Image: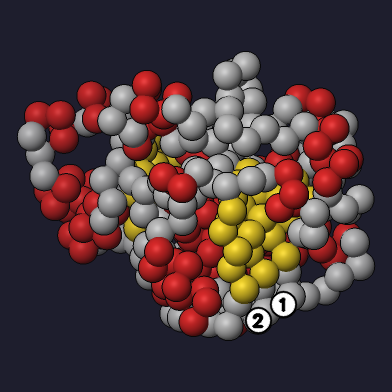
Amino acid sequence: MKFAGSHILSIGQFEREDIERVFTVADRMVPYAHRERVTKVLDGAILGNMFFEPSTRTRVSFGCAFNLLGGEVRETTGFESSAIAKGESLYDTARVLSGYSDVIVMRHPASGSVSEFAQASRVPVINGGDGANEHPSQALLDLYTIRKELRHQGRNDIDGLRIAMIGDLKYGRTVHSLCKLLGLYRNIHLVLISPDELRMPGEIVEALRMGGHTVVESDVMEASLSNVDIAYSTRIQEERFASKADADLYRGRYRLNQSIYTRYCEPNTVIMHPLPRDSRQEANELDNDLNDNPNLAIFRQADNGVLVRMALFAMILDVVDQVDKSARDVNWYTERRF
């Protein structure tokens, strides 16, 4: 894959060697993300952060990643604050805002919308999530997290991974993209745990099986967790349902707590979640009593998002080899929080 000047719209663009390139660059970003070094390699560059759906982590993570490379961020949040609310087309919006930015990150509730926007954009566009379709940067940071967690346990390869995905697999774009990414590796064993009505789309399951991977579908969580390296939980995607009442039919169906973890999971099973986890009493898919479990990786996962997004920006804007040239040590107090 040619990264310089390219859109990042789908996991389908990536080959395995492309992923390894992203991860190698992400590793190089650690001193900057951890506030040990400062670089101004993107000094003067502007990120257009366009989020037409609610977002905290993804929006702030992209903005933080760009700032840490020395660039500036301009944000549009919600339809009501954009000209789209006045009837402007995605084409016109793309043509205009790509004149104000060097790169654009876009989230939109309609599947395929970011790709449509990118066709009219004059600068590279990164898909920050388009409806229930895909979320490529989340899948990359998820796989980067999996690799780091496995290496911490002394394993150096994603091949042979055993992973359980739990919850809303029908509308969860993060698991759609992660499945496509895992399909590039060898001998992956997936356990897909969901209500029948919220099963993983059939075409994704079929593609995995055709790729030689093992896929088991189940509507029972506890026993299905007994032999996995990763337990990846997702929330019910209420915004994709016709009503809150429809989403409530499934909310709280699968709840992982420390008692269940101790009884059913292996001692080193890593717990992941794309966040936000729904901590309301009626949902609570990952209980707060897991917060002290050293295998709860959800906050390390969020930290890794900055590294991966820094890597994508550096590769798309073709400054990877210049990052260190403009670097200096941090000269303010910074807590050692990483």
Q: Which tag, 1 or 2, sits closer to the chain's start? A: 1
Q: Is residue 323 something that shows in the picture?
A: no
Q: Residue at x 45, y 73 (%)?
A: 206
Pointer 2 residue: 186
Q: Residue at x 28, y 51 (%)?
A: 111
**As shown in the figure, which amino acid type bears the numbered disc 2?**
Arg
* Label 1 – label 2 distance at C-alpha: 5 Å
Where residue 302 sits, quadrant-wise, is top right
Decide which of 154, 338 is in the foreground and name it. 154
Q: Residue at x 72, y 65 (%)?
A: 162
In this rendering, is residue 185 above or below 261? Answer: below
**Which label was assigned to residue 159?**
1
**Image position of 49 (left or right of 145):** left
**As shown in the figure, which amino acid type bears the numbered disc 1?**
Asp
Q: Residue at x 88, y 60 (%)?
A: 152
Give x and y (percent) for residue 291: 81, 30
For mark 1, give the secondary structure.
loop
Give x and y (percent) for residue 13: 42, 74
Q: Is residue 302 something that shows in the picture?
A: yes
For mark 2, give the secondary structure.
loop
